[in-house]
């Protein structure tokens, strides 16, 4: 158990709908990352927050948005869903949000499976 | 050309075999190299971390980085059925953010 909690574990929704994925980072971790994993694209970085502020942005669509709240939990909002958005969405957390170094390991949650039908 | 290329396999080996997993990359700015292991329906977990070129050993696992060839490897000695998982290479260039670029993963099955 990595200590990163994601809900819901599975979600089935229709095209055009909106969903919210929730993440609670490990205790003491200030940085939260969202990744999307699909069969054809692999694991893709979406966005990073550090202590409530957006730190880095990756391949995140405009239909997607995220935020990190004062209690450090984070939500990923996916709207106007398309079939191609079906994927496993991972949240990860780390203590720091800065330069990569051996101590700044990021820990992944078990993911939220999203199926768009 | 993709930034990180990884043979998806699948790779099937008998128990006790030496396993070699590899990734190539095109971005010469990458300095941090990692291997993650992902069991089915679970999140990736960090297995090995290497900075710049060289080798790193941890138990049955050895990670090698050859920056001149833009090639990294993970060797698993005395492979066990419990090593059956998808192995993902990941790379970062450092700086002020923590973006990791992942390979698509190699599915490994170790048969008892």
Image: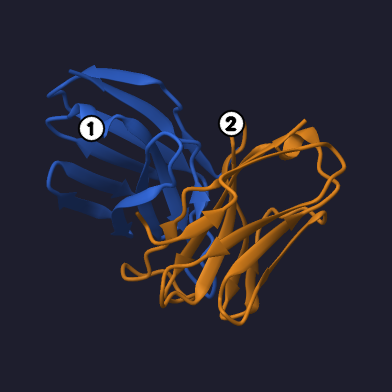
| Mark 1 lies on residue | B82
**How is the model colour-coded?**
by chain
Depth check: give the residue in front, A76 or B109. A76
Chain on which label 1 sits: B
Image: B7 above or below A95: above
Q: Residue at x 44, y 49 (%)?
A: B90
Chain B's colour? blue
Chain A's colour? orange
Q: Residues within 10 Å of mark 2 (few under 14, many from 20)?
A: few
Q: Position of residue B104 (x, y in %)?
A: 50, 36
Whether residues under marks 2 and 1 lie with C-beta atoms below 8 angstroms apart, the answer is: no
Q: Nearer the viewer, mark 2 or mark 1?
A: 1
Q: Is residue B47 left or right of residue A76?
A: left
C-alpha span from label 2 to label 1: 23 Å
The quarter of the rendered structure image containing the N terminus of chain B is top right
Q: Residue at x 40, y 20 (%)?
A: B10
Q: Residue at x 14, y 41 (%)?
A: B60
| Mark 2 lies on residue | A39
Q: Quadrant of residue B18?
A: top left
Depth check: give the residue in front, A57 or A18. A18
Q: Is residue A42 left or right of residue B16?
A: right
Image: A94 above or below B90: below
Q: Is residue B16 left or right of residue A71?
A: left
Q: Position of residue A112 (x, y in %)?
A: 58, 46
Q: Secondary structure at mark 2?
A: loop
């Amino acid at each position: 158990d990595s200590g990163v909690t994601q809900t819901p574990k599975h979600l089935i929704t229709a095209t055009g709908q909106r969903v919210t994925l929730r993440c609670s980072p490990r205790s003491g971790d200030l940085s939260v990352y969202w990744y999307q994993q699909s069969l054809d694209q692999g694991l893709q970085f979406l966005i990073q927050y550090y202590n409530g502020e957006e730190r880095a942005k990756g391949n995140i669509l405009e239909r997607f948005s995220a935020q990190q709240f004062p209690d450090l939990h984070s939500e990923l909002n996916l709207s106007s869903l398309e079939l191609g958005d079906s994927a496993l969405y991972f949240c990860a957390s780390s203590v720091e949000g800065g330069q990569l170094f051996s101590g700044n390991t990021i820990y992944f949650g078990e993911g939220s499976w999203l199926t768009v039908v | 050309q993709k930034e990180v290329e990884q043979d998806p396999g699948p790779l099937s080996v008998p128990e006790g075999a030496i396993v070699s997993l590899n990734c190539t990359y095109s971005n010469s700015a990458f300095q941090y190299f990692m291997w993650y292991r992902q069991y089915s329906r679970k999140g990736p977990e960090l297995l090995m971390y290497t900075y710049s070129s060289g080798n790193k050993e941890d138990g049955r696992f050895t990670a090698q980085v050859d920056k001149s060839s833009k090639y990294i490897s993970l060797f698993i000695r005395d492979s066990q059925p419990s090593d059956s998982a998808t192995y993902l290479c990941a790379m970062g260039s450092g700086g002020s953010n923590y973006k990791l670029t992942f390979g698509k993963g190699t599915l490994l099955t170790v048969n008892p």
